[in-house]
Image (cartoon, helix red, strand yellow):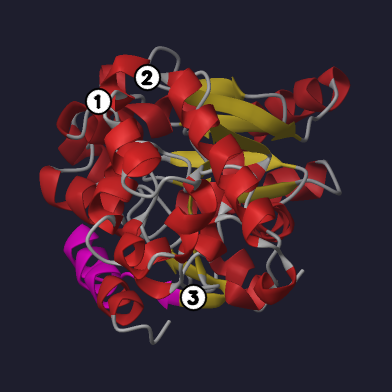
Amino acid sequence: MPIENISAQERAENIRKNIEYIMKKGNISKYADLTELIGVKYKTWGSFLKNPTSKSSAKKNFCEYFKIDPYMLENGSLEDLALFGSPKPADMPRKSNICILTDMDSVLNAGPTHKIGPEMAEILVKLAAHYRIGVITGQTYAKICEKVINPIKEIYNGFDFSSFHLLPTQGLEIYQYNSDIGDFEKIFEEKLNDDVMDRVEFALREAAEGHYVEGLSRIERRGGGQVTLVLLTDEKSTREMKQEYDRDRKIRNAIAARVEELIPGVVAVPGGTTSVDVSKAGKQFGYEKIAGIWGVKPSQILCFCDEAYEGGNDYALVKAGAFVRTIRFGWRDTLIAFKDLIELAEQKIF
């Protein structure tokens, strides 16, 4: 419904509900001077909405009290805020209709054995004020938390991750942040049945014959939809060993091709530096699924990945027609790109 067709009273009631939602989540004494901010200064919710002062001098306090993104007041009005049933950032339209889907290893961090650093943590927090962000990887939910989410929490205690979705196992699982519990929860999972998982494990062992070493290699079931062969485990190999192993991907490409030959219908791709991921769908599945969850066209998603070439584990996105920004020089390359996106959003270009 257009803003002009909503009465001040209706807008006021919606904002009141928003504020009550916020106050139920925390210590109400923290908001003790709301009476001064609203009850006394503006008398009624309607006058608070309509008073020009409330859109200038009070907007900083408003954002702080009600935990909303400043962009909503900078680019709209309190009437805009009243259109939304919850003040959670993910429930509000961004200044930009563009969303970001990013790979994790060697794109956000320095490689498979690294967490993101303080610079990347800072830029992701700033980016989340303007865009919805999805982190997609062949690794597990626990690994995304370890490498991306926890380092942000360590620096920005209490940060609201409502703008984030996590897509482990190439998007066969999707996690969304729940502000009420202060944590992510699974909202989607695409599974393989146990019989197929068993067949995939058997096929991986056969395809990796001569390369699979007991005690050094292992096969993992990641979630309910992906089986991963890890030729060099973190526990039994050094970072340098993993980086030098199968640098040209010949070993893992051969394994992946053989698995697909043995089990028609599955998708096998090299992952990380020493792994092969097998599932019923490639990364394009997560790309298309998150577009539906975000309510955007796939063409509105910017994808950041490091292996968008033929044979790379991100090439499925290229074949799906995604707009892909290939990261060629590691996480610092990503950092520059994200800074550009923030600048574009602040200038209201995106």
Q: CA distance from mark 2 to mark 1?
A: 8 Å
Q: Residue drawn at (34%, 32%), measured in percent from left and top?
A: 35
Q: Give, as a three-letter code, the residue at label 1.
A: Ser
Within the image, what quadrant is residue 228 found in?
top right
Q: Is residue 289 left or right of residue 348?
A: right
Query: Considering only vertical position in the picture, is 139 above or below 154?
Result: below
**Kind of element beneath mark 2:** loop
Q: What residue would you read off at disc 3?
A: 324
* Quarter the N terminus occupies: bottom right
Q: Give, as a three-letter code, the residue at label 2.
A: Leu
> Residue 12: where, in percent of width, then height?
58, 50
Q: What residue would you read off at disc 1?
A: 237
User: Of tags 3 and 2, which is closer to the observer?
Assistant: 3
Q: Residue drawn at (28%, 36%), measured in percent from left and top?
A: 36
- Please tell me how many numbered marks the rendered image carries: 3
**Kind of element beneath mark 3:** strand
> Residue 52: where, in percent of width, then height?
36, 70
Q: CA distance from mark 3 to mark 2?
A: 35 Å
Question: Which numbered disc flags the more N-terminal residue, 2 or 1?
Answer: 2
Q: What residue would you read off at disc 2?
A: 216
> Residue 158: where, in percent of width, then height?
29, 28
Q: Residue drawn at (22%, 46%), measured in percent from left and top?
A: 121
Q: Is residue 287 visible in the rendered structure shown here? A: yes
The secondary structure that most of the magenta stretch takes on is helix
**98 or 38, nearer to the observer:** 38
Within the image, what quadrant is residue 345 found in?
bottom left
**22 or 49, nearer to the observer:** 49
Please report the bounds of the magenta region as a residue range: 325-340
User: Of tags 3 and 1, which is closer to the observer?
Assistant: 3
